[in-house]
Image: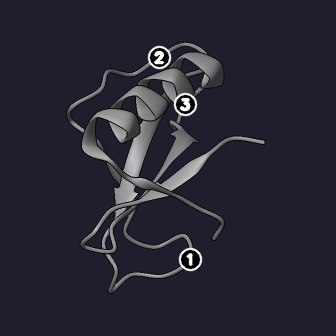
Amino acid sequence: MPKKYIDARGWKYQVMSGIGSVPAFKARYQKPEKQGDVGWKGLSAVPWRPSREEAQADLDRLAKEKGWQEWNG
């Protein structure tokens, strides 16, 4: 199961797919005042990737560098 993260501000992070026919995945974030599927934005610190696994590796690396906690939301 893919890991999700949350930072000290309450921002949530997870990998999501892009829109379109070409497979593309990227880490995205959501501010705490948003809930559900609303308000997810692409994380500019990481590129679009052709596979979910590559995008997850980017997110895992960034989470480790930033000290984010795993989130089970």
Q: Amino acid at mark 2?
A: Arg
Position of 72 with respect to 19 (left or right) is right
**Dot 2 lies on which element?**
loop
Residue 48 x, y percent position in the rendering: 39, 22
Q: Amino acid at mark 1?
A: Gly
Position of 66 with respect to 48 (left or right) is left
Residue at 33 percent across and 74 percent down: it is 10
Residue holding disc 1: 36
Residue 9 x, y percent position in the rendering: 24, 73
Residue at 21 percent across and 31 percent down: it is 45
Label number found at residue 49: 2
**Residue 22 vertical position relative to residue 36 in the rendered view, above or below:** above
- Alpha-carbon span between mark 3 and mark 1: 22 Å
Q: Amino acid at mark 3?
A: Gly
Q: Which is in the foreground here, disc 2 or disc 3?
A: 2
| Pointer 2 local density, CA inside 10 Å: few below 14, some 14–19, many at least 20 | some
Numbered-mark total: 3
| Pointer 3 local density, CA inside 10 Å: few below 14, some 14–19, many at least 20 | few
Q: Earlier in the sequence, mark 3 or mark 1?
A: 3
Label number found at residue 20: 3
